């Protein structure tokens, strides 16, 4: 079992992001837009291949929301071949940093597949691959969150000025 802890600072207050965060994480758990074709991606160059490109592994997620705590339990495994890819279980949390910024964090652990052989492959050939693909997922969620909130705030400001 390997532990992972990732953090991304958001240029938005946690109070403004709470409802959107819970809505996005709920959509993630139900595989609804924008997560209907969700896959973890891994660049071939990060695997030390001399060519550009990426490997995309379709994933299945299970999300349990805890909106009072501003967090969700997240389970991720391969949708097609769960016995051949790592399984992740962790918590995604929205935290206030100050009045204008917040942080989206992902903490948990993953289990490489196929026992000790999987541990060896994870430690050598795929070293850091799980963390990189989870960071990519966290960054995508953070970007969706920031874009959604900024779009909502701009629409509210336009309506307040009498514009459409």
Image (cartoon, rainbow, N blue to C red):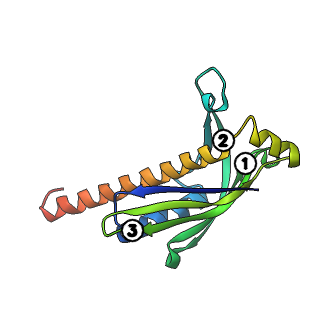
Question: Which of the pair 119/82 is nearer the observer?
Answer: 119
Position of 58 relative to 64 (above/below): above
Q: Position of residue 48 (x, y in %)?
A: 66, 27
Residue labelled with disc 3: 14
| Left or right placement of residue 7 versus residue 85 in this view | left
Residue labelled with disc 2: 129
Question: Which of the pair 160/112 is nearer the observer?
Answer: 112
Q: Quadrant of residue 118?
A: top right
What whole-number distance in Å separates the C-alpha atoms at marks 1 and 3?
31 Å
Q: Position of residue 69 (x, y in %)?
A: 52, 76
How many circles with numbers are drawn on the protein? 3
The residue sitting at 30% across, 59% down in the picture is 152
The residue sitting at 62% across, 32% down in the picture is 46
Position of 100 relative to 86 (above/below): below
Q: Which-is-in-front pick, marks 1 and 3?
A: 3
Position of 50 relative to 136 (above/below): above
The residue sitting at 39% across, 65% down in the picture is 17
């Amino acid at each position: 079992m390997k532990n992972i802890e990732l953090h991304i600072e958001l240029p938005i207050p946690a109070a403004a992001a709470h409802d959107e965060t819970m809505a996005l994480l709920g959509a993630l758990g139900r595989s609804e837009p924008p997560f209907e074709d969700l896959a973890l991606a891994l660049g071939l160059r990060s695997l030390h291949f001399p060519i550009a490109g990426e490997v995309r592994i379709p994933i299945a997620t299970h999300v349990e929301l805890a909106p009072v705590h501003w967090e969700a339990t997240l389970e991720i495994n391969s949708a097609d071949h769960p016995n051949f890819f790592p399984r992740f279980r962790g918590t995604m949390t929205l935290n206030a940093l100050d009045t204008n910024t917040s942080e989206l964090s992902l903490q948990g652990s993953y289990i490489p597949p196929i026992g000790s052989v999987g541990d060896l492959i994870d430690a050598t050939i795929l070293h850091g691959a799980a963390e990189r693909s989870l960071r990519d997922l966290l960054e995508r969620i953070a970007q969706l969150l920031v874009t959604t909130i900024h779009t909502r705030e701009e629409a509210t400001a336009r309506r307040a000025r009498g514009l459409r």
